[in-house]
Image: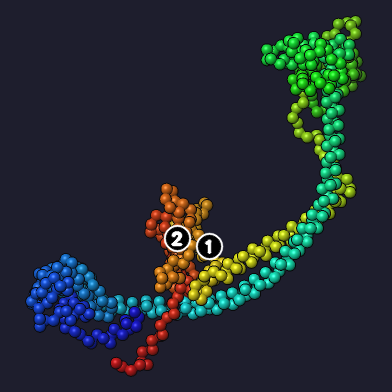
Amino acid sequence: MLLVLLLLPMCWAVEVKRPRGVSLTNHHFYDESKPFTCLDGSASVPFDQVNDDYCDCKDGSDEPGTAACPNGSFHCTNTGYKPLYISSRWVNDGVCDCCDGTDEYNSGIVCENTCKEKGRKERETLQQMAEVTREGFRLKKILIEDWKKAREEKQKKLIELQAGKKSLEDQVELLRTLKEEAEKPEKEAKDQHRKLWEEQLAASKAQREQELATSAFQELDDDMDGAVSVAELQTHPELDTDGDGALSEGEAQTLLGGDTQTDAASFSDRIWAAIRDKYRSEVLPTDPPSPSAPDLTEPKEEQPPVPSQPAEEEDDEEEEETEEEEEGEEGEEEDSQVQGEQPKETPPPVVPPQTASPTEEDKMPPYDEQTQAFINAAQKARNKFEEAERSLKDVEESIRNLEQEISFDFGPNGEFAYLYSQCYELTTNEYVYRLCPFKLVSQKPKLGGSPTSLGTWGSWAGPDHDKFSAMKYEQGTGCWQGPNRSTTVRLLCGKETVVTSTTEPSRCEYLMELMTPAACPEPPPELPAEGNHDEL
């Protein structure tokens, strides 16, 4: 196009006579020496009816220079600029549509001929584009050479990694064997340690249960005859089994296994397990004991009531008074006993089992020195194995990435390869668009928020004759009640790599333009400078 425009001034002197509004390419259809045949072949008219301001042909070809045919076309010669076809309806409408003003020959409007100025600007623009193309193509050749070198280096690196992978695999298998050998004595020692601890825990639990059962038996044995009878068991209605709030004689006897009474041994072996969850001690304290309170399983030492002291002796007896306050509840209980009656030894209260946090006794004790040594040795072997395994996985990941990059289609000569590890952004009033070539496209609200996928790499999407002029990114985030988002990226020639625009021509279908030297075609040979050629 640049060549044609530069040569136009040389052709201006050649003028072919033809009717107004007829292009040079169509002038042979308009021979004034014979009738005119409509270009669509619909009719023939005398030549003097061409441009007579009356539409004779259906296609309007007999009125190329008037507005008579609404479907006709007027050709603007626009000498010095680009020729142009306009609708016949615009002829003599008072608006200058042709830069040479030939469309307003009979409207009374004087149109300035701006074709030469437009041609000059057009040539400047084309020259600038030619310069961009030349510089972009120069950079493109550098990109091609860079990829050739990088590809060779990556292939060498791939061969090294593949060789190193075999060595790492052997090392991992050796360390796996050593780890498994070290874990065997570790497991045996830990299992033995746990077994001993669980046995001790079970023995301690059984002992506690025995103490609770003994304490409950003593409390139930009101007459202290060494046996718990049906009547004595009936004093605890909370053991009711039919839900009527009272423990009947039959229910009590059933709990005693059908017997009328049971001794301490049978109570511990058979009866206690059946009633322990419901059983409530008769002497449970009204307030929960504080952490500093004595162990409930230890019987309290009986304290006689302490008489009140005279006022003058209070200062000398502060310590005894403190002890009296601490034992106040027990003192009140003793005061309520009948004078002269021998108090019965109060059995310890039986507290029902409750879910509590593990005590020190429930925690497994530290490992002995030998077991800990086995654990340390096994852990050291595990660390070495895991480190080698991580190294192997890293190498495998590097191999996969290199194989993918080396085999990727980066254009006819690999000119687009430099885009593979890059990302480019375009900020608009509302969004920040991000393009990572061969990977993904996304948008994120400018004022903050999560990014939305506009598609991941699909394929080259240019036409058959120019496959590498567009990219397609598919399967982005789904639109509300619509398809998944997708993006077409058009590649334009430029000296720099930059995203120039992003639009949404259709719902959920985006169009992005990326300027890159890799898209620059080889420019035509430069024209010789003026003055260095023969005149035509």
What secondary structure is marked by label 1?
loop
Residue ID for mark 2: 487
- Identify the residue shown where x is 42% and y is 62%: 511
Asked if residue 292 is positioned above or below residue 117 in the image, the reply reads: above
Q: How is the image coloured?
A: rainbow
Q: Position of residue 405 (x, y in %)?
A: 57, 68
Mark 1 burial class by Cα count in 10 Å: few <14, some 14-19, many 20+: some
Three-letter amino acid code at the position of disc 2: Thr
- Identify the residue shown where x is 86% and y is 13%: 227
Work out whether residue 276 can be spotted.
yes
Mark 2 burial class by Cα count in 10 Å: few <14, some 14-19, many 20+: many
Judge from the rendering whether residue 469 lies leftward or rightward of residue 181; answer left or right. Answer: left
- Identify the residue shown where x is 80% and y is 11%: 230
Residue ID for mark 1: 439
Instruction: Kindly identify which numbered label has been placed on residue 324.
Output: none
* Quarter of the view holding residue 417: bottom right
Task: Name the outermost residue toward the bottom.
Answer: 534
Q: Position of residue 1 (x, y in %)?
A: 34, 79
Asked if residue 121 is positioned above or below residue 177 in the image, the reply reads: below
Q: Nearer the viewer, residue 101 or 168?
A: 168
Q: CA distance from mark 1 to mark 2?
A: 12 Å
Judge from the rendering whether residue 124 lies leftward or rightward of residue 222; answer left or right. Answer: left
Judge from the rendering whether residue 482 lies leftward or rightward of residue 223; answer left or right. Answer: left
- Identify the residue shown where x is 75% and y is 9%: 249
